[in-house]
Image (cartoon, coloured by chain):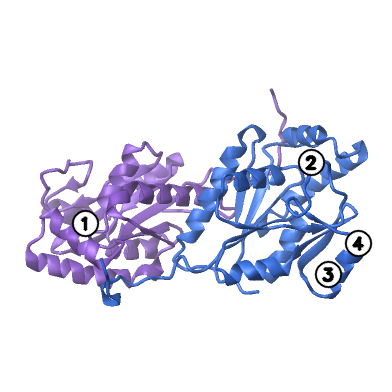
Chain colours: A purple, B blue
Amino acid sequence: MKKTTDRSLPSSDLTSRPLFIVLSGSSGAGKDAVLAKLKESGYPLNYITTTTTRPQRPNEKNGIDYHFVSIESFQQMIKKEELLEWANVYGNWYGVPKEPVRKALAKGQDIMVKVDIQGAASIKKILPEGIFIFLMPPSKDELLTRLKQRHTESPSELALRLKAAEEEIKQLPLFDYSVTNRWDEIEQAVATIKAIITAEKCRVTPRKITL
Amino acid sequence: MKKTTDRSLPSSDLTSRPLFIVLSGSSGAGKDAVLAKLKESGYPLNYITTTTTRPQRPNEKNGIDYHFVSIESFQQMIKKEELLEWANVYGNWYGVPKEPVRKALAKGQDIMVKVDIQGAASIKKILPEGIFIFLMPPSKDELLTRLKQRHTESPSELALRLKAAEEEIKQLPLFDYSVTNRWDEIEQAVATIKAIITAEKCRVTPRKITL
Protein backbone atom coordinates (compact mmCIF):
# COMPACT_ATOMS: atom_id res chain seq x y z
CA MET A 1 0.00 0.00 0.00
CA LYS A 2 1.35 3.37 -1.04
CA LYS A 3 1.36 5.88 1.76
CA THR A 4 1.69 9.62 1.47
CA THR A 5 3.97 11.41 3.87
CA ASP A 6 1.18 13.24 5.69
CA ARG A 7 -0.38 9.93 6.76
CA SER A 8 2.64 8.95 8.78
CA LEU A 9 3.09 9.75 12.44
CA PRO A 10 5.90 12.04 13.53
CA SER A 11 9.07 10.06 13.81
CA SER A 12 11.80 10.69 16.32
CA ASP A 13 14.27 9.20 13.86
CA LEU A 14 15.07 6.49 16.37
CA THR A 15 16.83 3.98 14.21
CA SER A 16 19.01 6.20 12.08
CA ARG A 17 21.66 6.91 14.68
CA PRO A 18 24.23 4.19 15.15
CA LEU A 19 25.26 3.14 18.63
CA PHE A 20 28.87 3.02 19.77
CA ILE A 21 29.07 0.25 22.33
CA VAL A 22 32.12 -0.20 24.50
CA LEU A 23 32.40 -3.65 26.05
CA SER A 24 34.87 -3.67 28.88
CA GLY A 25 35.27 -5.16 32.33
CA SER A 26 37.59 -6.82 34.76
CA SER A 27 40.54 -8.81 33.59
CA GLY A 28 39.29 -12.39 33.39
CA ALA A 29 35.60 -11.45 33.46
CA GLY A 30 35.15 -13.13 30.11
CA LYS A 31 35.07 -10.28 27.61
CA ASP A 32 36.48 -12.46 24.81
CA ALA A 33 34.11 -15.36 25.47
CA VAL A 34 31.07 -13.08 25.59
CA LEU A 35 32.15 -11.28 22.43
CA ALA A 36 32.67 -14.60 20.65
CA LYS A 37 29.15 -15.78 21.59
CA LEU A 38 27.70 -12.46 20.50
CA LYS A 39 29.41 -12.76 17.11
CA GLU A 40 28.34 -16.41 16.80
CA SER A 41 24.73 -15.42 17.35
CA GLY A 42 24.90 -13.30 14.20
CA TYR A 43 23.86 -10.17 16.07
CA PRO A 44 24.16 -7.23 13.65
CA LEU A 45 27.03 -5.21 15.06
CA ASN A 46 30.15 -3.93 13.43
CA TYR A 47 32.83 -5.38 15.69
CA ILE A 48 36.02 -3.35 15.70
CA THR A 49 39.12 -5.49 16.00
CA THR A 50 41.72 -4.14 18.40
CA THR A 51 45.30 -3.74 17.26
CA THR A 52 47.88 -5.13 19.67
CA THR A 53 51.56 -5.81 20.08
CA ARG A 54 50.84 -8.69 22.46
CA PRO A 55 51.99 -12.14 21.25
CA GLN A 56 49.32 -14.15 19.46
CA ARG A 57 47.92 -17.01 21.58
CA PRO A 58 47.57 -20.41 19.88
CA ASN A 59 43.77 -20.24 19.68
CA GLU A 60 43.68 -16.70 18.33
CA LYS A 61 43.23 -15.60 14.72
CA ASN A 62 44.97 -12.54 13.36
CA GLY A 63 42.46 -9.98 12.13
CA ILE A 64 39.63 -11.69 14.02
CA ASP A 65 40.65 -11.73 17.67
CA TYR A 66 43.19 -8.95 17.27
CA HIS A 67 45.28 -7.32 14.60
CA PHE A 68 48.68 -8.50 15.78
CA VAL A 69 51.35 -5.97 14.84
CA SER A 70 54.94 -5.18 15.72
CA ILE A 71 55.82 -2.43 18.19
CA GLU A 72 57.20 -0.42 15.26
CA SER A 73 53.92 -0.62 13.33
CA PHE A 74 51.99 0.32 16.44
CA GLN A 75 54.20 3.36 16.98
CA GLN A 76 53.58 4.39 13.36
CA MET A 77 49.80 4.19 13.93
CA ILE A 78 50.11 6.45 16.98
CA LYS A 79 52.21 8.95 15.00
CA LYS A 80 49.72 9.02 12.14
CA GLU A 81 46.84 9.46 14.62
CA GLU A 82 45.22 6.28 13.33
CA LEU A 83 44.16 5.11 16.79
CA LEU A 84 41.04 6.14 18.69
CA GLU A 85 42.75 5.23 21.94
CA TRP A 86 45.73 3.19 22.95
CA ALA A 87 47.20 1.93 26.18
CA ASN A 88 49.90 -0.26 27.59
CA VAL A 89 48.51 -3.12 29.64
CA TYR A 90 50.89 -5.57 31.33
CA GLY A 91 53.67 -4.45 29.00
CA ASN A 92 51.74 -4.83 25.74
CA TRP A 93 50.15 -2.15 23.59
CA TYR A 94 46.50 -2.22 22.64
CA GLY A 95 44.74 0.29 20.41
CA VAL A 96 41.41 0.84 18.68
CA PRO A 97 41.86 1.83 15.02
CA LYS A 98 39.83 4.86 13.95
CA GLU A 99 39.24 4.00 10.32
CA PRO A 100 36.81 1.07 10.73
CA VAL A 101 34.86 3.09 13.34
CA ARG A 102 34.45 6.00 10.91
CA LYS A 103 33.42 3.65 8.10
CA ALA A 104 30.80 1.91 10.24
CA LEU A 105 29.39 5.25 11.47
CA ALA A 106 29.13 6.46 7.88
CA LYS A 107 27.12 3.35 7.03
CA GLY A 108 24.90 3.88 10.09
CA GLN A 109 26.03 0.58 11.60
CA ASP A 110 26.10 -0.06 15.33
CA ILE A 111 29.63 -0.52 16.55
CA MET A 112 31.10 -2.61 19.32
CA VAL A 113 34.62 -2.31 20.62
CA LYS A 114 36.09 -4.53 23.29
CA VAL A 115 38.65 -2.78 25.44
CA ASP A 116 40.16 -3.06 28.88
CA ILE A 117 39.17 -0.58 31.58
CA GLN A 118 42.00 1.83 30.73
CA GLY A 119 40.80 1.84 27.14
CA ALA A 120 37.20 2.40 28.15
CA ALA A 121 38.24 5.34 30.34
CA SER A 122 40.16 6.86 27.39
CA ILE A 123 37.24 6.37 24.98
CA LYS A 124 34.83 7.85 27.54
CA LYS A 125 36.77 11.12 27.29
CA ILE A 126 36.58 11.20 23.48
CA LEU A 127 33.13 9.65 22.97
CA PRO A 128 31.09 10.14 26.14
CA GLU A 129 27.95 9.40 24.08
CA GLY A 130 29.08 5.79 23.80
CA ILE A 131 27.30 3.05 25.68
CA PHE A 132 29.71 1.71 28.27
CA ILE A 133 29.16 -1.83 29.48
CA PHE A 134 31.19 -3.29 32.34
CA LEU A 135 31.42 -7.06 32.31
CA MET A 136 31.66 -8.21 35.90
CA PRO A 137 32.88 -11.54 37.29
CA PRO A 138 30.36 -13.04 39.70
CA SER A 139 32.88 -13.30 42.56
CA LYS A 140 36.54 -13.03 43.43
CA ASP A 141 36.77 -16.80 43.89
CA GLU A 142 35.37 -17.49 40.47
CA LEU A 143 37.60 -14.85 38.90
CA LEU A 144 40.71 -16.51 40.40
CA THR A 145 39.57 -19.93 39.19
CA ARG A 146 39.05 -18.61 35.67
CA LEU A 147 42.38 -16.83 35.53
CA LYS A 148 44.13 -20.04 36.67
CA GLN A 149 42.26 -22.15 34.10
CA ARG A 150 43.42 -19.87 31.32
CA HIS A 151 47.03 -21.04 31.88
CA THR A 152 48.33 -17.93 30.15
CA GLU A 153 49.69 -16.22 33.24
CA SER A 154 52.55 -17.04 35.56
CA PRO A 155 51.71 -17.04 39.31
CA SER A 156 53.11 -13.53 39.68
CA GLU A 157 51.15 -12.33 36.65
CA LEU A 158 48.06 -13.97 38.17
CA ALA A 159 48.46 -12.10 41.45
CA LEU A 160 48.96 -8.89 39.46
CA ARG A 161 45.80 -9.50 37.44
CA LEU A 162 43.69 -10.25 40.50
CA LYS A 163 44.89 -7.10 42.21
CA ALA A 164 44.25 -5.19 38.99
CA ALA A 165 40.73 -6.60 38.73
CA GLU A 166 39.94 -5.25 42.19
CA GLU A 167 41.29 -1.85 41.21
CA GLU A 168 39.44 -1.95 37.89
CA ILE A 169 36.07 -2.48 39.54
CA LYS A 170 36.55 0.92 41.17
CA GLN A 171 36.15 2.39 37.67
CA LEU A 172 32.58 1.08 37.53
CA PRO A 173 31.02 4.56 37.93
CA LEU A 174 32.44 5.50 34.51
CA PHE A 175 30.11 2.93 32.96
CA ASP A 176 26.44 2.98 32.03
CA TYR A 177 25.71 -0.70 32.58
CA SER A 178 27.11 -3.54 34.63
CA VAL A 179 26.55 -7.08 33.37
CA THR A 180 27.56 -10.01 35.54
CA ASN A 181 29.06 -12.88 33.59
CA ARG A 182 28.66 -16.26 35.21
CA TRP A 183 30.99 -18.53 33.32
CA ASP A 184 28.47 -21.34 33.13
CA GLU A 185 25.87 -18.92 31.79
CA ILE A 186 27.64 -16.88 29.13
CA GLU A 187 24.44 -16.94 27.06
CA GLN A 188 22.77 -15.01 29.87
CA ALA A 189 25.35 -12.21 29.71
CA VAL A 190 25.02 -12.15 25.91
CA ALA A 191 21.22 -11.89 26.18
CA THR A 192 21.58 -9.05 28.67
CA ILE A 193 23.91 -7.16 26.34
CA LYS A 194 21.41 -7.61 23.50
CA ALA A 195 18.66 -6.29 25.79
CA ILE A 196 20.77 -3.22 26.56
CA ILE A 197 21.26 -2.59 22.83
CA THR A 198 17.52 -3.06 22.17
CA ALA A 199 16.69 -0.59 24.94
CA GLU A 200 19.24 1.96 23.75
CA LYS A 201 17.79 1.77 20.24
CA CYS A 202 14.39 2.75 21.71
CA ARG A 203 15.74 5.86 23.43
CA VAL A 204 13.64 8.91 22.63
CA THR A 205 16.75 11.08 22.84
CA PRO A 206 19.44 9.12 21.05
CA ARG A 207 23.09 9.69 21.79
CA LYS A 208 24.78 11.31 18.84
CA ILE A 209 28.18 9.88 18.00
CA THR A 210 30.64 11.94 16.01
CA LEU A 211 34.22 11.07 15.33
CA MET B 1 30.28 -23.19 49.56
CA LYS B 2 30.30 -20.67 52.36
CA LYS B 3 31.77 -17.36 51.36
CA THR B 4 33.04 -14.67 53.64
CA THR B 5 32.22 -11.09 52.84
CA ASP B 6 35.77 -10.08 51.95
CA ARG B 7 35.88 -12.64 49.14
CA SER B 8 33.10 -10.91 47.26
CA LEU B 9 33.64 -8.21 44.71
CA PRO B 10 32.36 -4.71 45.40
CA SER B 11 28.71 -4.56 44.55
CA SER B 12 26.96 -1.55 43.16
CA ASP B 13 23.76 -2.78 44.78
CA LEU B 14 22.21 -3.07 41.36
CA THR B 15 19.23 -5.24 42.06
CA SER B 16 18.02 -3.80 45.33
CA ARG B 17 16.35 -0.73 43.91
CA PRO B 18 12.93 -1.26 42.45
CA LEU B 19 12.02 0.31 39.12
CA PHE B 20 8.96 2.45 38.61
CA ILE B 21 7.88 1.91 35.02
CA VAL B 22 5.29 4.12 33.40
CA LEU B 23 3.70 2.59 30.31
CA SER B 24 1.90 5.19 28.28
CA GLY B 25 1.36 6.13 24.67
CA SER B 26 -1.10 7.30 22.09
CA SER B 27 -4.76 6.55 22.43
CA GLY B 28 -5.31 3.32 20.52
CA ALA B 29 -1.63 2.36 20.44
CA GLY B 30 -2.45 -0.84 22.27
CA LYS B 31 -1.42 -0.15 25.87
CA ASP B 32 -4.05 -2.54 27.24
CA ALA B 33 -3.19 -5.35 24.83
CA VAL B 34 0.54 -5.03 25.51
CA LEU B 35 -0.03 -4.92 29.26
CA ALA B 36 -2.25 -8.02 29.06
CA LYS B 37 0.46 -9.94 27.15
CA LEU B 38 3.10 -8.80 29.62
CA LYS B 39 0.97 -10.05 32.54
CA GLU B 40 0.21 -13.31 30.72
CA SER B 41 3.92 -13.95 30.27
CA GLY B 42 4.31 -14.00 34.05
CA TYR B 43 6.89 -11.25 34.00
CA PRO B 44 7.61 -10.29 37.64
CA LEU B 45 6.20 -6.79 37.92
CA ASN B 46 3.80 -5.33 40.41
CA TYR B 47 1.11 -3.95 38.12
CA ILE B 48 -0.79 -1.05 39.65
CA THR B 49 -4.46 -1.00 38.70
CA THR B 50 -5.80 2.43 37.78
CA THR B 51 -8.93 3.73 39.45
CA THR B 52 -11.49 5.18 37.07
CA THR B 53 -15.00 6.59 36.90
CA ARG B 54 -15.31 5.45 33.28
CA PRO B 55 -18.08 2.88 32.62
CA GLN B 56 -16.88 -0.73 32.67
CA ARG B 57 -16.66 -2.29 29.19
CA PRO B 58 -18.15 -5.79 28.74
CA ASN B 59 -14.76 -7.50 28.48
CA GLU B 60 -13.24 -5.72 31.48
CA LYS B 61 -12.85 -7.06 35.01
CA ASN B 62 -13.17 -4.79 38.02
CA GLY B 63 -9.96 -4.75 40.04
CA ILE B 64 -8.00 -6.26 37.15
CA ASP B 65 -8.42 -3.90 34.21
CA TYR B 66 -9.43 -0.95 36.39
CA HIS B 67 -10.91 -0.25 39.77
CA PHE B 68 -14.27 1.06 38.65
CA VAL B 69 -15.59 3.58 41.17
CA SER B 70 -18.26 6.26 41.37
CA ILE B 71 -17.46 9.91 40.89
CA GLU B 72 -18.15 10.43 44.61
CA SER B 73 -15.62 7.76 45.64
CA PHE B 74 -13.06 9.24 43.25
CA GLN B 75 -13.55 12.71 44.74
CA GLN B 76 -13.03 11.23 48.22
CA MET B 77 -9.73 9.68 47.09
CA ILE B 78 -8.55 13.06 45.79
CA LYS B 79 -9.54 14.76 49.06
CA LYS B 80 -7.72 12.15 51.14
CA GLU B 81 -4.64 12.47 48.88
CA GLU B 82 -4.82 8.79 48.04
CA LEU B 83 -3.97 9.30 44.37
CA LEU B 84 -0.51 9.64 42.88
CA GLU B 85 -1.97 11.48 39.92
CA TRP B 86 -5.39 11.91 38.42
CA ALA B 87 -6.79 13.40 35.27
CA ASN B 88 -9.97 13.79 33.32
CA VAL B 89 -9.76 12.20 29.89
CA TYR B 90 -12.70 12.42 27.51
CA GLY B 91 -14.99 13.24 30.44
CA ASN B 92 -13.91 10.35 32.70
CA TRP B 93 -11.60 10.42 35.69
CA TYR B 94 -8.52 8.21 35.93
CA GLY B 95 -6.16 8.03 38.88
CA VAL B 96 -3.23 5.98 40.14
CA PRO B 97 -3.69 4.96 43.78
CA LYS B 98 -0.67 5.65 45.99
CA GLU B 99 -1.04 2.83 48.49
CA PRO B 100 -0.17 -0.16 46.24
CA VAL B 101 2.82 1.78 44.87
CA ARG B 102 4.15 2.41 48.38
CA LYS B 103 3.61 -1.24 49.35
CA ALA B 104 5.44 -2.52 46.26
CA LEU B 105 8.36 -0.12 46.80
CA ALA B 106 8.63 -1.27 50.41
CA LYS B 107 8.88 -4.88 49.18
CA GLY B 108 11.49 -3.87 46.59
CA GLN B 109 9.21 -4.93 43.74
CA ASP B 110 9.37 -3.38 40.29
CA ILE B 111 6.23 -1.44 39.53
CA MET B 112 4.37 -0.83 36.31
CA VAL B 113 1.59 1.68 35.88
CA LYS B 114 -0.34 2.16 32.67
CA VAL B 115 -1.50 5.71 32.17
CA ASP B 116 -2.49 8.03 29.34
CA ILE B 117 -0.13 10.79 28.26
CA GLN B 118 -1.64 13.34 30.65
CA GLY B 119 -1.09 10.90 33.50
CA ALA B 120 2.49 10.21 32.43
CA ALA B 121 3.21 13.95 32.32
CA SER B 122 1.81 14.36 35.85
CA ILE B 123 3.82 11.40 37.20
CA LYS B 124 6.96 12.73 35.50
CA LYS B 125 6.71 15.83 37.73
CA ILE B 126 6.38 13.77 40.92
CA LEU B 127 8.64 10.82 40.03
CA PRO B 128 11.11 11.94 37.37
CA GLU B 129 13.24 8.89 38.26
CA GLY B 130 10.58 6.66 36.74
CA ILE B 131 11.16 4.89 33.45
CA PHE B 132 8.79 6.41 30.93
CA ILE B 133 7.85 4.23 27.96
CA PHE B 134 5.79 5.62 25.07
CA LEU B 135 3.88 3.02 23.12
CA MET B 136 3.65 4.21 19.56
CA PRO B 137 1.25 3.11 16.81
CA PRO B 138 3.13 2.19 13.63
CA SER B 139 1.17 4.64 11.45
CA LYS B 140 -1.82 6.95 11.39
CA ASP B 141 -3.67 4.58 9.04
CA GLU B 142 -3.19 1.64 11.35
CA LEU B 143 -4.18 3.73 14.36
CA LEU B 144 -7.45 4.73 12.67
CA THR B 145 -8.17 1.12 11.71
CA ARG B 146 -7.60 -0.03 15.26
CA LEU B 147 -9.75 2.66 16.82
CA LYS B 148 -12.58 1.77 14.40
CA GLN B 149 -12.26 -1.96 15.16
CA ARG B 150 -12.62 -1.28 18.85
CA HIS B 151 -16.26 -0.19 18.27
CA THR B 152 -16.25 1.71 21.54
CA GLU B 153 -16.25 5.20 20.09
CA SER B 154 -18.82 7.12 18.12
CA PRO B 155 -17.58 8.72 14.87
CA SER B 156 -17.17 12.09 16.60
CA GLU B 157 -15.29 10.45 19.50
CA LEU B 158 -13.12 8.69 16.92
CA ALA B 159 -12.17 11.96 15.24
CA LEU B 160 -11.42 13.43 18.67
CA ARG B 161 -9.20 10.47 19.59
CA LEU B 162 -7.27 10.62 16.34
CA LYS B 163 -6.67 14.33 16.75
CA ALA B 164 -5.67 13.71 20.37
CA ALA B 165 -3.24 10.96 19.33
CA GLU B 166 -1.47 13.41 17.04
CA GLU B 167 -1.25 15.93 19.85
CA GLU B 168 -0.12 13.25 22.31
CA ILE B 169 2.85 12.23 20.18
CA LYS B 170 4.18 15.76 20.67
CA GLN B 171 4.72 14.76 24.31
CA LEU B 172 7.27 12.15 23.25
CA PRO B 173 10.27 14.15 24.54
CA LEU B 174 8.96 13.64 28.11
CA PHE B 175 9.63 9.93 27.70
CA ASP B 176 12.76 7.82 27.99
CA TYR B 177 11.83 5.13 25.49
CA SER B 178 9.59 4.83 22.46
CA VAL B 179 8.30 1.36 21.56
CA THR B 180 6.40 0.87 18.33
CA ASN B 181 3.50 -1.54 18.65
CA ARG B 182 2.55 -3.29 15.45
CA TRP B 183 -0.78 -4.89 16.15
CA ASP B 184 0.13 -8.13 14.46
CA GLU B 185 3.35 -8.27 16.49
CA ILE B 186 2.34 -7.43 20.06
CA GLU B 187 4.84 -10.02 21.30
CA GLN B 188 7.58 -7.90 19.75
CA ALA B 189 6.54 -4.81 21.73
CA VAL B 190 6.34 -6.94 24.89
CA ALA B 191 9.84 -8.32 24.27
CA THR B 192 11.16 -4.79 23.75
CA ILE B 193 9.63 -3.60 27.02
CA LYS B 194 11.24 -6.58 28.80
CA ALA B 195 14.58 -5.65 27.21
CA ILE B 196 14.20 -2.08 28.50
CA ILE B 197 13.54 -3.39 32.00
CA THR B 198 16.53 -5.77 31.79
CA ALA B 199 18.76 -2.90 30.67
CA GLU B 200 17.50 -0.55 33.37
CA LYS B 201 18.21 -3.22 36.01
CA CYS B 202 21.85 -3.26 34.82
CA ARG B 203 22.30 0.49 35.23
CA VAL B 204 25.41 1.31 37.22
CA THR B 205 23.70 4.39 38.63
CA PRO B 206 20.21 3.25 39.48
CA ARG B 207 17.34 5.70 39.66
CA LYS B 208 16.18 6.06 43.24
CA ILE B 209 12.42 6.12 43.63
CA THR B 210 10.90 7.68 46.73
CA LEU B 211 7.24 8.29 47.34
Q: Nearer the viewer, mark 1 or mark 2?
A: 2
Q: Which mark is residue B77?
A: 3
Residue position marked by numbered label 1 in the rendering:
A94
At numbered mark 2, what does the secondary structure look like: helix, strand or loop?
Answer: loop
Relative image position of residue B94 (x, y in whole percent): 81, 58
Label 3 and label 4 in one chain: yes
* Distance of label 2 from label 3 (alpha carbons): 26 Å
Give the amino acid at mark 4: Ile
* Of the pair B48 and A149, the residue shown nearer to us: B48
Relative image position of residue A24 (x, y in whole percent): 32, 58
In the displayed structure, would residue B86 be above or below residue B153? below
Left-right relation of A47 to B196? left
Give the amino acid at mark 3: Met
* Distance of label 3 from label 4 (alpha carbons): 10 Å
Give the amino acid at mark 2: Asn
Q: Residue at x 11, y 55 (%)?
A: A152
Q: Nearer the viewer, mark 4 or mark 2?
A: 2
Q: Residue at x 66, y 45 (%)?
A: B36
Q: Please give the chain letter of the residue carrying mark 3.
A: B
Residue position marked by numbered label 4 in the rendering:
B71
* Distance of label 1 from label 2 (alpha carbons): 62 Å
Residue position marked by numbered label 2 in the rendering:
B59
